[in-house]
Every structure is written in structure tokens, then in C-alpha cells.
Amino acid sequence: MKFAVLASSSAGNSTYVESNGTAVLIDAGTNAKCIGAALRAIGADPAALAGICLTHDHTDHTSAVAVLEHRYRTPLYATDGTIDVVCCGCANDEGADWPWVSFAPGSSFEIGALRFEAFPVPHDAGDPVGFAVTDGRARLGFATDLGTVPEVVRHHLRDCDALAIEFNHDPLMLERSDRPRSLVQRIRGRSGHLSNEQGAELLAAVAGPRLRHVLPMHLSGECNRPDLAVAAARDALRGAGLDPDLVREPAYPSPLYEI
């Protein structure tokens, strides 16, 4: 299996996964031009995507869906709650005619050589999910946009070869920011976003001996710094007796990692 993070921040999110001739995106939340350029930079073809799997309905995860669907008729995989919200935001009900494939949180589905285990996450969206993706040999755990970490999340992220986990904010930077108090409370809430400390706690709880790559994800541009997120992740691995150099620097598009 190979994967690359094309974009990951509050401004836009998209991750590429491929194995044995099957290529998919997890989210498409930046503009289609940027996604196309990032795919070509890693040697991938946007027209060859077998599907786009959406974690939830927020625009930083869905904003390129309309253009990509119109251009390539790529099948769209999402929960009913995500489909409903995305379609409601479309002009002239055009989203209802898109090639949706619905799945339920807690279920599994296959796209070619890839199997997706969708697990519910606590976030303020309609039926949001994370994914564990496997090709029968390697396993990628993917969890962003969650305010707390229930056992179902830890369960699906254990025994992975690679982990893409949210390290959204530094609590002190968030507290000192100029953001409205209501937004600060939302981010810190049980359905908001994980801090560096919370991301590190999750990583320490699920990291195992087969782990080869850790990617801190969805860093806030205003309330976090890459060095803080990386340091927290490396400390978590060190505390778990694993190599801290498994943590990858947040730079996008990332290299095409192989597991």
C-alpha cells in the first residue's frame, strides 16, 4: 500500500491511498486544481481514482467534490448524514444525482483492492467517521476531526503500519488567540478537535511494533506549530518504547509513503 497526504489543515484536507491498481482519495477539501496538481506531483492520475471517501460534510473536507465528480464521475462514498448535508449545500439539488455509495458508521466496504473499516468519531457533523484502510497486508489508520477519543477509535487504530492522527492545536496558543470565545469552546469541546496533548495520548495508546509512519494531521495555522505537534508525537513514541523518528514532518503534498 502507498499513501500521501495532499493537504491537511483547517483550509483543506485530502489524502491519497493506493494498492494493487486501486487508487482513492480520503476527503477532497481543497480546490480541484490543487488536488490535481498534488496527485500529478506524486505520479498519480486524477482520472484513475476509483472513489472518494468522505469522513464528514464540512467544506474543508468536501469543497472539491462537485468539480471532481463533474469532471471524472468518481464514485463518492459517505454516510447518509454526510450525503444529506453535502446535497443540501448543492445548487439545484444537483448532488442528488451524483454517484453516491452509502455506508454506515461501524461498517466495512471494499473499493477494488482496498477495504475500509469506517468507525464513528465525536465531531460536530452529520455521521462523521474515521477509517482503517487495509489491502490485506498493510494497514493505515486515519482519524482527524474528533474532540475526544472513545474506545472504538482506539480499537480501529491499533496494529497499524501507519497512523494519520489529528494534532490540531496547542491549548495555550488557542487560549491566547483572537478567536471568538464560542469558537475556542467549540474546538476544545467533546465534538471539536484534538490538541497536541490529546493526539499524543491517542498515539501512545495505539502505537505498536509494526508502526512505520506517523503523520500529525489537521494542524491549525493560527493555533499550532509543526514543531510543537511533531515534538508531542515523538515524545509519545519515545514513551511507548518506539523510534521517535517514525514521525513525519507536516509538509504537503507529502512524499508517497509505502507500507
Image (spheres, rainbow, N blue to C red):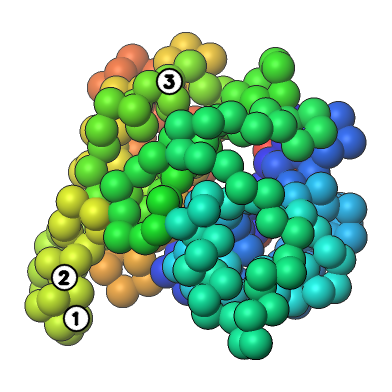
Q: Distance between the residues labelled 3 and 1?
A: 35 Å
**From the viewer's perspective, is residue 88 above or below residue 208?**
below
Determine the secondary structure under disc 2.
helix
* Location of residue 92 in the rendering, given as x and y in whole percent from the top left corner: 65, 87
Disc 3 designates what residue?
Answer: 158
Determine the secondary structure under disc 3.
loop
Circle 3: residue type = Arg
Disc 1 designates what residue?
Answer: 179
Circle 1: residue type = Arg
* Location of residue 185 in the rendering, given as x and y in whole percent from the top left corner: 13, 67
Q: Is residue 54 visible from the viewing direction of this image?
A: yes
In terms of image quadrants, where is residue 238?
A: top left
Disc 2 designates what residue?
Answer: 184
84 vs 126, left or right, is: right
76 or 23, nearer to the observer? 76
228 vs 102, left or right, is: left
User: Which residue reaches farthest top?
Assistant: 209
Mark nearer the N terminus (2 vs 1): 1
Q: How crowded is mark 2: few (under 14 residues within 10 Å), some or many (20 or more)?
A: some
**From the viewer's perspective, is residue 116 above or below residue 188?**
above
* Location of residue 162 in the rendering, given as x and y in whole percent from the top left corner: 55, 30
> Do the numbered discs 2 and 1 sit on residues whose CB atoms are within 8 Å?
yes
Determine the secondary structure under disc 1.
loop
Quadrant of the image for the C terminus? top right
170 vs 82, left or right, is: left
> Do the numbered discs 3 and 2 sit on residues whose CB atoms are within 8 Å?
no
Circle 2: residue type = Val
**From the viewer's perspective, is residue 73 above or below residue 193?**
below
Q: Is residue 61 visible from the viewing direction of this image?
A: no
Q: How far apart are marks 3 and 2 (CA)?
A: 30 Å
